[in-house]
Image (tube, rainbow, N blue to C red):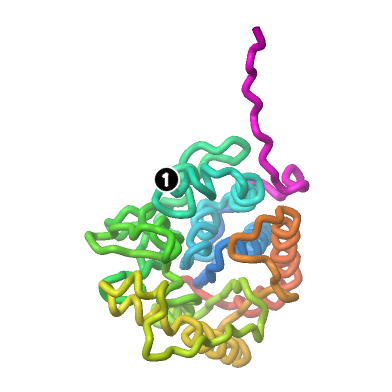
Amino acid sequence: MAISIPVKRMIAYYSGLKKLPSGHADDSITPGCIVLEGGAFRGVYTSGVLDALMEAGLNFQCTVGVSAGSMNGMNYVSGQIGRSARINLRYRHDNHYVGLRALRKNRGLIGFDFVFGHMEGVPAFDQQRFSDKRRSYYAVVTNLNTGEPEFIGKESGASIFQAVRASASMPYISRPVMIRQQPCLDGGCSVNIPYQWALDQGFEKIAVVRTRQRGFRKTVRPVSGRMPRKESLYRSYPAFMEQLLHAEERYNRECAELEALEDSGRIAVIAPSQPVTVGRLEPDMEKLGALYYLGYNDARAALPALQSYLKGASAE
């Protein structure tokens, strides 16, 4: 009688996984705020940028992230070099993280239970460092009832893990996450690059990490009298639906304003030095690995200008 032996399915991962940077950031505090754009798997670029900043001893006192930026931001605040990259470049094709199992268990594309649990080959999350009161952290979510962004701090009383889950939960395919008894989804549905929040908080020094190259703009869809089918999923949340209908216009306006602030020297920006061709759900692991190193090398190249910009900043 033949014996059936289960075969463990091999999951594709980035070929340079073992050579990724690793270690811990030092304990220094860099006055100012770092703002992290979203973009799903384009956020691998941000992982590279943040690893290079941590290696250079640039650990901002405040971090605010949208969607994938919120997930990258957690590992930046916890000071764990290479942790974000190891999650995405090792587990992109594990359906506990992205795929059907995640969808069934988490009612969304990303398996947050898996991300926040034990992952082989990924260091455990440094909760102690993340909880350091000298370092503030905010995840941006969109409230479906108001259509407005909300900035959930790690000491706000709400579960920060729930806030990150909501911030990175894409519309159309994810179930809303309840935050303070309010249904919430991806922060990028209401604000893509929250530099204005950092300005409103009074930060003298602000660094923004983009996931699209300078000059990039989205094609604006004409909004006719007929409601698009996918947006109609949210007809019970008219304010949220309105945000979705005008998403491209809002994004382009944010880009133009941010570029003007960079040109004036008010804000420092690190953005991809070449066009990003990686998709939001990019399956090609080598492309993702290349994007990580684009971010890592862009940040290293930007260090002299960034350090000059930060010179003389004082703690808030």
137, above or below 5, in the image: below
Does dot 1 land on a helix, a strand or a loop?
Answer: helix
Q: Nearer the viewer, residue 296 or 179?
A: 179
What secondary structure prevails in the magenta region?
loop
User: What span is colored magenta in the figure?
Assistant: 1-24
Q: Quadrant of the N terminus?
A: top right
Q: Is residue 122 toward the left or the right of residue 286 in the image?
A: left
* Residue 203, position as x, y percentages in the image: 46, 78
Name the residue located 58 percent from the left edge and 78 percent from the top edge.
312
**Amino acid type assigned to the residue bearing label 1 in the image:** Arg
Q: Quadrant of the C terminus?
A: bottom left
* Residue 85, position as x, y percentages in the image: 64, 52
Can residue 303 be seen from the camera position used here? Answer: yes
Can residue 81 be seen from the camera position used here? Answer: no
* Residue 93, position as x, y percentages in the image: 62, 47
178, above or below 201, in the image: above
Q: Is residue 70 toward the left or the right of residue 273 in the image?
A: left
Q: Which residue carries the number 1 mark? A: 104
Residue situated furthest left in the rendering = 181
Residue situated furthest top in the rendering = 1
Residue 164: image quadrant is bottom left
Q: Is residue 73 within the magenta segment?
A: no
Name the residue located 57 percent from the left edge and 75 percent from the top edge.
207
Q: Is residue 210 toward the left or the right of residue 105 in the image?
A: right
Residue situated furthest front in the rendering = 1
83, above or below 154, in the image: above
Q: Nearer the viewer, residue 78 or 217?
A: 217
